[in-house]
Image (tube, helix red, strand yellow):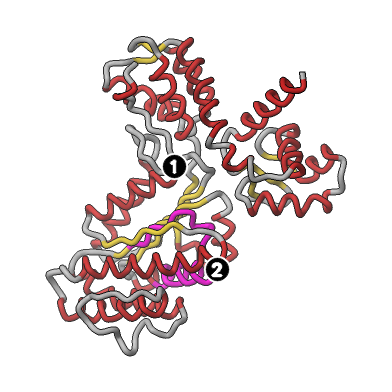
Amino acid sequence: MDPLINPYRPGAGIRPPELVGRQAEIDLVDLMVAHSHRRRNDGGLILYGLRGVGKTVLLSRLQHIVERAGWVTVQLEARPGEPGKVIARHSLARGIAMAGRKMARFKHATAEVREALASITSFSATIGGTGVTLGVDASLHRANSGLIEVDLEELIADLVVPLQKNQSAFAIFIDEMQDLDQDLLTALLAVQHRAGQQDWPFYIIGAGLSTLRRTLAEARSYAERFTIREVGALPAAAAAAALTKPAEDLGARFTSGALDELLGAANGYPFFLQTYGKAVWELAPDRVIDAMSAMAGIEEGNADLDQGFFPARWDRTTPLERRYLNAIVAVSGNTASTASIAAALEKPASSLSPVRQSLIDKGIIFSERRGYVSFTVPNMDAFIRRQNDVDDADED
């Protein structure tokens, strides 16, 4: 069919034509907005899950919802390492400065708004090293200690009155939250905790990998101030809708056999649904997509994934790390105990600890519970099996 009207859009953070299966999270944020109008704060929201499940897309949708409700927002994407630490502070400071420009247009509590802008100016200069012009001088006494937890709490405290009097709230949206440095993470958790105690209109809404839940617990014991939700594979009905609804809107349809093939290959993961949907649309000869077209689309989709999505991780591994990953697949597919991996490789478990940690640092596996590791990417086991098939064919 015509690729110019192909409705399917695979890609990191790209909104699909149908955002399905995430109504529970949308309802949570709608309730958060409703409670904020009553000056009630029940805490922030944390989303975690594997790559390819649509966390970034969902985070963007939630930000759009609160902005339509009149909230002021900041968005940042965390990155690992010392460069990431610097970038996060610059992004936070600049984002808060941009939020200050929006607050400058508030109609009520103008005196309190100017005081808030003074604190924003001092915070941006002290924490982010940015020179912002908001029409006021930097505060001499607020948000300028250089201690991020102290300064962030003072800043948010100064925003409370103008936000409340203008029926607004302030939210920081953070993607890849597991990569925040410890100081910034603990500061954000502390201020969210304080906001919950005082019913301040301040919220953190973050998303990250499955390790994020444990990272939060280790950072501060009161991470329970968040609603924490796993974003996983879509239920069967939602996954089917993600494929069928965009096609039906353009006058096309899937046969039951085609739909079964595609749903089985994608395992409910939104990124793969979009990848296979895009491929099958361009291969189908007419607007009735049958099982044969679906199988061809899956093969073409896997070829695309094997050229871009998976190699972004696989190509960064050493030969020994690849043996470790192969052992995970051989033992159980996606999740395996470190003891069983060591047995499969015929090595002492302690000797494999550096390999395991290197793969964790590279974001290829994670350890959610002691003694077990899992792939961070869905269907990584299928990719590794395909790589092995290619290697075996080359040897023949």
> Residue 280 appears in which quarter of the rendering?
top left
Residue at screen point 27% across, 81% down: 118
| Residue 185 part of the magenta-drawn span | yes
Q: Dot 2: few (<14), some (14–19), or many (≥20) neighbours within 10 Å?
A: some
**Residue topped by disc 2:** 182
> Residue 100 appears in which quarter of the rendering?
bottom left
Q: Is residue 87 left or right of residue 121?
A: right
Query: Label 2 vs label 1: CA separation?
Result: 26 Å
Q: Dot 1: few (<14), some (14–19), or many (≥20) neighbours within 10 Å?
A: some
The amino acid at mark 2 is Gln
Viewport quadrant of the C terminus? top right
The amino acid at mark 1 is Ala
Tell me where residue 233 appears, x and y as whole percent.
49, 35
Residue at screen point 77% across, 43% down: 320
Q: Nearer the viewer, residue 215 or 314?
A: 314
Task: Give the magenta-colored segment's residue range.
Answer: 171-194
* In the image, residue 209 above or below residue 257: below
Viewport quadrant of the N terminus? top left
Count of marks placed on residues? 2
| Residue 225 part of the magenta-drawn span | no
Judged from this view, the residue extending furthest toward the bottom is 140
Query: Disc 1 on helix, strand or loop?
Result: loop
Q: Nearer the viewer, residue 392 or 167?
A: 392
Q: Which mark is residue 12?
A: 1
Tell me where residue 79 appears, x and y as whole percent.
51, 58
**Mark with earlier residue (2, 1):** 1
Q: In this view, does 145 lie to the left or right of 219?
A: left
Q: How would you classify the magenta stretch by its main secondary structure?
A: helix
> Residue 57 appears in which quarter of the rendering?
top left
Query: Disc 2 on helix, strand or loop?
Result: helix
Residue at screen point 80% across, 45% down: 339
